[in-house]
Image (spheres, rainbow, N blue to C red):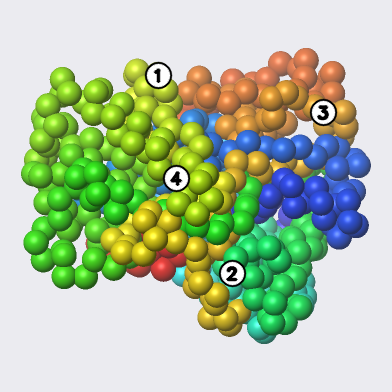
Amino acid sequence: MQSLKDTKLLVIGFDSADFFLVKQYMEEGLLPTFSLLAERGFFSQLDSTTPYQSGPAWTTFATGVSPCKTGIYSFHLPPEHYEQKPVFSNDIPYPAFWEILGSMGFRCGVANIPMLSYPTRAFNGFVVSGYPSPDEGTSYPDNFHADIYENTSLKIPLPDGFELLSEYIKQTIYSDLRRASAAPELARNRPVDGLVIMFDMLDRVQHYYRHEYDRDHPAHNPDSPDAVKNIIPECYMLADRITLFLLNEFNAWDTCFIVSDHGSRPMAWRYNLFRFLMVNKLITLREQAYVDRSVSAGLKTLLPLLQQDRTIVYPVHETLSTAIGLDLNIRGRELTGVVPPGSADMLADSIIGQLKQERNPVTGETVFEEIYRREELCDAEYAHNSPDILALCNHKIISVPAFAEEVRQIMPPVHTQHRTSHQITGAHRREGIFFGAGKTVRGDFEITPSPAIVDIAPTVLAHCGVDKTPAMDGQRLPIFTGNTAAKSLKKPSAIITCDRAEDACAHEVTEQERQAAIDRLTGMGYI
């Protein structure tokens, strides 16, 4: 069986690892492994996608293709006949960088990467799926991971304060530690040249416990135990220990990249999107939907409540979001469209003008900091993949599709007990992290503007001596020393995709699997 000392590549992802917090904790001496990697290589801000959401960001990380080409702006596809469906791997027509490497004879193991790994797609290596897969997911080949996971003991201690956390957060942390602990055995069982693995805990703990950490947060509870108030830095330190464990197990100090899909920030206000749409007469609800106008639910629940033939615009983003996507109900494009095509541009401009006027009635701040027409996001060839309007929320606000009667469009979060916290008090921001260390990696790497997540796939390919594909929007970053930067990169082999060879496809998703994925994403607040 192959020694793990032969590993040539280690890529670790930490969902929602924030550039500013990592920088702060490194300066405070809390993250010795990250600091050592930065000393041996580099540490940089990594800009996320627009919008800075996990679904599009991890897809772009894997493929090097921007959301406007993939059409992935969320965890679900754009509504088809006003019905939302979660994104599965066979909805993404571009290969992941590990699939490209596999076609070149470089075997990769992949664990818990969202979107591209469920259903698992056949390639030269192994995959343990990430969300939207149900529970612990599936694996290729032969679902081999189940016994390994079941028989693996934790090699990394649980963080302080673990027992005080909600069951959902405890399960997320435990799953991450088991995934890290099992990774060496997965690679011994299915020998590989590289490992790509992602961990969820930072995203979840920052979503649900940011108010405990930030003393000036309006929902901060001064009576919470210190262990709960400190759970965010504790989890960052846990990420540092996970990194050390994997670096040592795979002897990957000279072959390592660490990335995050976006950063994290406190969130103190909730913008009630549906109320805005109702007040401005942009949507009409079916009569029975008025029974309970305080409801807040996922779009999969709310969209069927719309009276489509009297609705002008409808939302196309998830339940709790730092961005909103809106599509005009255009006649001839939508099933029961009502907006004349010739009026669409004027209507979009009018809605954007209304959104720009939305303000927090308490602070006076604008609700949205950036608003785009689809033509501003993408070239004309791919514009149809994007929402008609994409608005990014002010950094203190998230959007919720709710029929709320409280403070106009905005309401502050309520105090919650640390054991049963379901109120989201942390959201995303653009600035993620990027570490690189290796024999051919420059220690003086600096690029302006900041590198972007779309650049990761072509850069990892270059590290392995392979050029990017023509479809990739990202660029190979100038992180390598002269010899590596100047060497001739091999052209990628022809990639077998689901469009070209049926036996290489992910299996068709059954209705039971689809519903299980919807249930999981709904429970996570993504649909």
Across and down, in percent, residue 522 comes to 38, 64
Q: Which residue is mark 1?
A: 379
Residue shown at 25% from the left, 62% from the top: 301
Q: CA distance from mark 4 to mark 3?
A: 41 Å
> Does dot 1 land on a helix, a strand or a loop?
loop
* Marks 1,2: beta carbons within 8 A: no
Q: Which residue is mark 4?
A: 359
Q: Which residue is mark 2?
A: 219
108 sits to left or right of 237: left
Q: Nearer the viewer, mark 2 or mark 3?
A: 2
Q: Nearer the viewer, mark 4 or mark 3?
A: 4
Going from the N terminus, do you reach mark 2 or mark 3 first? 2
Alpha-carbon neighbours of circle 2 within 10 Å: few (<14), some, or many (≥20)?
many
Q: Nearer the viewer, mark 1 or mark 2?
A: 2
3 sits to left or right of 212: right
Along the line of sight, the residue nearer the viewer: 134 or 280? 280
Q: CA distance from mark 4 to mark 1?
A: 31 Å
* Marks 2,4: beta carbons within 8 A: no
Q: What label does residue 445 carry, if any?
A: 3
Across and down, in percent, residue 418 comes to 60, 79
Going from the N terminus, do you reach mark 1 or mark 2 first? 2
* Marks 4,3: beta carbons within 8 A: no
Q: CA distance from mark 1 to mark 2?
A: 43 Å
Q: Nearer the viewer, mark 4 or mark 1?
A: 4
Amino acid tagged 2: Ala
Q: CA distance from mark 2 to mark 4?
A: 21 Å
